[in-house]
Amino acid sequence: MRRYFDIFFAACIGLAFAGLAVGLGPEPTVRWIPPKPLPVESTELPQVPPYHLVDNRARGPNAVFFSHLDRLSGNGPALSDKVVQTLAEKQSALALRASRRAYAGAPPAIPHPVDANQVASCLLCHGEGKRIDSIIAPKMSHPPFTNCTQCHVQAATPGLGPSLPVENAFIGLTSPTGGTRAWPGAPPTMPHQVWMRQQCTSCHGLLGRPGLRTTHPERVNCLQCHAQDAAADHRDFSRELTTGR
Amino acid sequence: MSQSNTTIQQGLGLDRRALLKASALAAASAMLPSEGQAGDPPANVGVDGDVTWAKAPCRFCGTGCGVLIGTKADRIVAVQADRDNDVNKGLCCMKGYHVGLILYGQDRLTRPLLRQDGELKPISWDQALDLIADRIAAAPQKFAMYGSGQWTIPEGYAANKFVKGGLGHNHIDPNARLCMASAAAGFNATYGVDEPAGCYDDLDHCTVLINWGNNPAEMHPVLFSRVCDRRLRGEKITLIDLTTRRTRSSEQADHVWLFKPNTDLAIANGIAHVLVAKGCLDKPWVQKHFRLRQRVANYIKAGGTHTADYDPEAIHPKNLAGKDISREEFIAALADYSPEQVEKISGVPASGIRLMAELMADPAQRVLSWWCMGFNQHTRGTAINSLLHSIHHLSGQWGKQGASAFSLTGQPSACGTAREVGTFAHLLPGHLPVLDPHYRGLVEDHWNLPHGRISGKIGFHTVKMWDEFCTAGGGIDTLWVQVTNPGQTLPNRNKLFLAKRNHPEKFLICSDVYPNATTALADLVLPSAMYVEKNGMYGNAERRTQHWFKMVKPPGEARDDAWQTIAVSRRLFDRGMPGMKDKDGQWLFERTLADADGSLPPLWDWDHYYDRNVDERLFEEFRPLTKVKHKDLAPYGEYVKAHGLRWPVVKQADGSWKETLWRFVEGSDPNVEPGKGLQFYHSNSKDDRAFIWFHPYEHAPEEPDEAYPFWLCTGRVIEHWHSGTMTMRVPQLRRSMPAAYIELHSADASRLNVRSGDPVVVESRRGSLRLPAWIGGRGQPPEGTVFVPFFDERLLINDVTLDAHDPFSKQPDFKKCAVRLRRG
């Protein structure tokens, strides 16, 4: 073992001296060897594009991260931050929600490319929710399932080319804008179903959009004060679901 | 009439207002500084509050999820998954959640159209019905109907009675022939009666799940999740994915074994080989309940050039049930299928074959196998279906909660309408074979027809029907298509569909909801009501019959398919056509539709069609026939109340109706005699036993060679259903999957010098197609294999596929053929 080490050590010193000699010596003559011409079919060999040409659109809403690396922050608001709700914020939050759904209650479309099929890659951001800069990856509103792309459709699949537009005149149910209050200051009732929205904090928690975020995130038992709507949840068993015409 | 015109105009007015509103929103949302993408569909505006919710099964696949449809002002405004439906328990897939949008594509067909000087021009319903009646009256024997597994049960029943009871021949076949005919033949060959013994409850109890060439994460996502979600609750499920390419389902699997196309029979035989070596044949269970069976003769004729070059005698329908094989012969036949040999044939490692056999032989496990089009669209489809049942019989993984061999279906009523209503060319309602004079007499009596009216000759099956139609002087000259799109879905389209262009004397009638590849060649196009624009009933893959009521009015002059059939029948009766009369000279549908007091309301007149519940009357007439093969259905009213019931549904002492979860199993199936344990009461061998089959592995009719060196496999994607006529009009689904593509392995792609998005021409001996390449996309085929989905009407892969078919089911092998590729 020792012998090998000696040989290696000697070789290193030798190389160092040789390098020094070459570096100090006169410039060697450089003979240019022209490269062999590429076979014709290889002229279109795929080339990796330089970074500045990488299409940012493919990153979807996350493109902003790459131009604002300096002000990225992974921290959401603190529990103690004061929340002031404005009507404008609420309307803008509801409009954004609406733009991603065919109707109130539809599973939202995925506004970014999906290039991994495993549920773990979805959970990385949507498991607990994430906020980076102005981008919010909401926490799932429902308990985890194993096949996210079963329900959530990609807003667009890049690379497959344009599709002929076919107009569709469907007009979806609007989101409710708020529950009812028995008197000013009373806790509002829940204006939407609870099924698939068991995780209130998905929209109303700390990472919720301004306008939808709760003013009292320190309270964790939402259903203690906010009454459900049995009809919205189809749990009003006194009512017949089927109608004849 | 004037009243209904006003309603139509109001309807159109609402459409226009709605559209204006929608466009305004689209413009407004484009200006929002949101992260929403330009061109987002106008979503989520316009309607709120006071929504009426009603139940329906989903319109799309054979899973049969329950949905709640929310309507307001005669329009669908929302959809929810039905939590009270045991199929999906409150979860849908992306197609189901968007099912309400399929009604509102802007190019809905709203008027009858007749081709005049090459162009489709509007005519009245009266003219249209007269034209059909003229064509039928001129040559009733040369008229055929081509329907589908999307026909509602009453629609299919009306069409079936019209053709078989009225016209006295059996030229009616559903597109289910291209979809699950092999599964039906496999059940019949093995149990003597069609349809699965198990049900979806097995998904909640299995400990091992084997995907046999199916990709349930995309094609039956709700059922696949039902299994995989159990893992989140801490349950251990071994998931084995046998596949010809890596898919989304592979991502969830413990073992992914790629096999060479068509070698599934070798894999099943390999498992049987190991099971036999483990002594499974000696188990009392096997000896008591099963017989060993093989085919009567080699299917390939002497000197045949390929696997589908059949000997007509060997493949005669009477040979479906095969013949007995001795224990020694059975063992000897399996000797060629040691795991090592199967590895050489299929590419599945010998250790994998052994592992599957070990799991199946382990009584502590509950093994569930499932499959879909990979088995059915196969020139040995009946054989591989039979083999799968067999390895479950042999191992004892059958008839226990979670242990089953389950055939999935692709259409919402492939079981209900194609199989139970018997809209196949060889069946009568109740799944009764037309070849049997006893059953013909029974149905004739039920319909009050003179004996001899129903023909004992099997009608043209799908491929034959279209071949006859597209051939000069062929046996069919008028063809009426309802609820399906054969212009896209037939194999070898040039020969079986497009050739119609050369025969102006042939007349193609097409009832549909949107323009598609079929209406493109049709001479007469009839606008149909779709989905919840009409009453309906569907039967899903687990024998569950589901019901819905009409919720919104159809647009313009669109009308129910069942009404169209009944109206034509009435017109022919009024003209005095003898076939449209029963033996008392009354109209064929008189007894069906009459009130209790015997008077007949004019239900053939559209203005009066909904004066009575025609669906209920058709269904109640059909219902007694379901008892013959022990597929008892409950009265219509029970389905109105229930969120689906699985047949046989049997009345209890207290007057309630009870569904059946597991057929042939004592304690679950009321038809099994006490003490029998298992009883196959429709056994082909008449001894209450089912079969354990041996079928040899044989080569595919076309395999890659020097000229055509690649395997082409075809399939589907989660976004689109069937030929995309509906889902391609849903913006959310269409934007996610806008066009068909060809999946390639990266090594093949670099040899061809193509990158994702580059055009590739895929070419077979029958046709060619130019598609964009997708490398490392949703699925990853192995080297030497490419994959193309079939939903895109602009990129029709069926110009390339094969029309060789299974000897018994007559189902073509769409799934695989040999192709060559070049950069396009």
Image (cartoon, coloured by chain):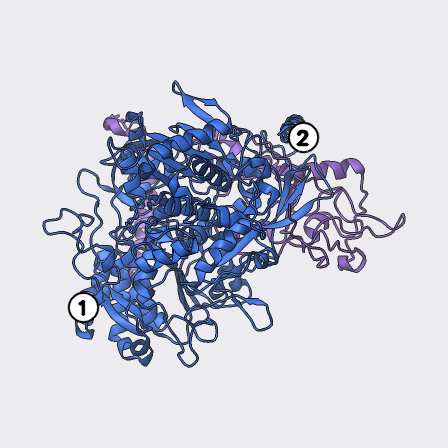
Secondary structure type for disc 2: loop
In this picture, residue B326 sits left or right of residue A160: left
Work out whether residue A2 can be spotted: no
Q: CA distance from mark 1 to mark 2?
A: 70 Å
Relative to A30, does residue A100 appear above or below in the rendering? below
* Chain corresponding to blue in the figure: B
In this picture, residue A200 sits left or right of residue A63: right
How many labels, in total?
2
Work out whether residue B389 can be spotted: yes
Where is residue B396 drawn, in percent x and y?
A: 36, 73
Q: Earlier in the sequence, mark 1 or mark 2?
A: 2
Where is residue B504 drawn, in percent x and y?
A: 31, 25
Residue B784 or residue A37, whichever sits in front = B784
Where is residue A97 drawn, in percent x and y?
A: 66, 40
Identified at 33% across, 70% down, the residue is B393
Residue B10 or residue B791, whichever sits in front = B10
- Residue B33 shows which numbered tag? 2
Relative to B65, does residue B20 appear above or below in the rendering? above
Q: Chain of mark 2?
A: B
The quarter of the rendered structure image containing the C terminus of chain A is top right
Density class for disc 2 (Cα within 10 Å; few <14, some 14-19, many ≥20) is few
* Chain corresponding to purple in the figure: A
Q: Chain of mark 1?
A: B
- Residue B335 shows which numbered tag? 1
Identified at 25% across, 36% down, the residue is B764
The quarter of the rendered structure image containing the N terminus of chain A is bottom left
Q: Amino acid at mark 2?
A: Pro
Q: Mark 1 and mark 2, same subunit?
A: yes
Where is residue B786 drawn, in percent x and y?
A: 31, 42
Q: Amino acid at mark 1?
A: Ala
